Image (cartoon, rainbow, N blue to C red):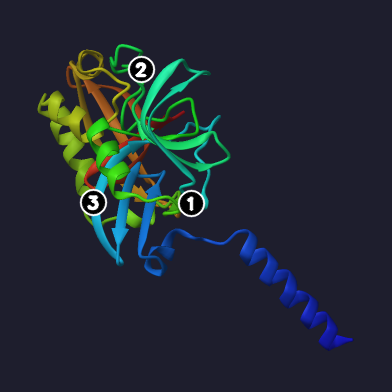
């Protein structure tokens, strides 16, 4: 009876591990593969276990997340009209269920770029979007049945220098170098003029930086206006490859 219980437990664990397998590192098992990290919004592709190229991408938002797991490219087409969005999707490669694709940023019927959709931002859709030149390069390289490995992996781009990025960000703000702070933040949804307006008269001093178990940085700050303390702030930052890819304040 004891042996039977051990066997049943082993089978349950085996099924569980297969169901929730982490496929992201399997690129070493295939001649050609595409890896997508929805945390850093980067796509890398590999041939004979060596990285060929890395591209910045846009992935789905919380309401329409890009699926995680192991997939294969099942169909390819140089251009397709999306009837739901009524947009042209160039260099489309399907990897799941006819609705999950890798493709260039959407364009209208005159091939004008849809300016509401940008790289490095979450989009209201499940797909993975690339700059058109990057999408063309990937489309020409990838073959049908090429593996696509997708994960939300903060650790892949974590660096011991991440803390320096955040310090540099506040240094730019404190010295009025808003354009460099904006570039470092890499938040395409916040325009430069509004960014400058928010911080124009402020001086922000870092009081403490802590790293939590999720590899996010908790930053405590004091915000001054005309040398007068107006607020103590707590913000969360996510850093990837020397860029602040997400930040938000805690109340």
Q: Do the residues labelled 2 and 3 touch (CB within 8 Å)?
A: no
Which residue is identified by label 2? Answer: 116
Q: Are marks 1 and 3 in contact (CB under 8 Å)?
A: no
Looking at the image, which residue is at 27% across and 26% down?
A: 223
For the residues labelled 2 and 1, the Cα–Cα distance comes to 29 Å
Q: Which of marks 2 and 1 is in front?
A: 1
Front residue (pair 161, 225): 161
List x then y, in percent, for residue 14.
Answer: 67, 71
Earlier in the chain: of badge 2 and badge 1, it is: 1
Compared with 192, 40 (above or below) is below
Q: Which of marks 1 and 3 is in front?
A: 1
Q: How crowded is mark 1: few (under 14 residues within 10 Å), some or many (20 or more)?
A: some
Which residue is identified by label 3? Answer: 53
Q: How many marks?
A: 3
User: The residue tagged with tag 2: helix, strand or loop?
Assistant: loop
For the residues labelled 2 and 3, the Cα–Cα distance comes to 26 Å
Q: Which of marks 2 and 3 is in front?
A: 3
Q: Can residue 208 be seen in this view?
A: no
For the residues labelled 1 and 3, the Cα–Cα distance comes to 19 Å
List x then y, in percent, for residue 142.
Answer: 34, 49
Looking at the image, which residue is at 32% across and 22% down?
A: 189
Position of the N terminus by quadrant: bottom right
Left or right of residue 92, residue 11 in this image = right
Q: Residue 72 carries which label?
A: 1
List x then y, in percent, for residue 168.
Answer: 16, 40
Earlier in the chain: of badge 2 and badge 3, it is: 3
Looking at the image, which residue is at 20% across and 42% down?
A: 167
Q: Residues within 10 Å of mark 3 (few under 14, many from 20)?
A: some
Q: Is residue 38 visible?
A: yes
């Amino acid at each position: 009876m004891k042996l039977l219980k051990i066997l049943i437990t082993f089978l349950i664990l085996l099924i569980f591990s297969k169901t929730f397998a982490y496929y992201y590192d399997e690129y070493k098992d295939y001649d050609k593969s595409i890896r997508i990290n929805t945390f850093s919004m980067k796509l890398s592709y590999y041939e004979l276990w060596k990285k060929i190229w890395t591209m910045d991408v846009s992935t789905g938002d919380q309401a329409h997340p890009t699926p995680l797991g192991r997939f294969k490219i099942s169909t390819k087409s140089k251009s397709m009209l999306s009837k739901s969005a009524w947009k042209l999707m160039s260099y489309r490669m399907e990897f799941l269920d006819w609705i999950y694709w890798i493709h260039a940023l959407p364009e209208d019927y005159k091939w004008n770029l849809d300016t509401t959709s940008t790289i490095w931002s979450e989009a209201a859709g499940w797909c993975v979007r690339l700059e058109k030149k990057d999408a063309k390069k990937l489309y020409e390289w990838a073959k049908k049945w090429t593996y696509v490995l997708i994960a939300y992996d903060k650790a892949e781009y974590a660096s011991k220098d991440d803390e320096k990025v955040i310090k540099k960000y506040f240094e730019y703000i404190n010295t009025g170098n808003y354009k460099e702070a904006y570039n470092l933040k890499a938040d395409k949804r916040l325009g430069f003029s509004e960014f400058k307006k928010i911080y124009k008269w402020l001086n922000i001093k870092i009081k403490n930086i802590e790293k939590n178990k999720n590899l996010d940085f908790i930053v405590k700050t004091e915000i001054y206006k005309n040398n007068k303390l107006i607020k103590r702030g707590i913000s969360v930052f996510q850093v990837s490859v020397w860029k602040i890819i997400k930040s938000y304040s805690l109340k």
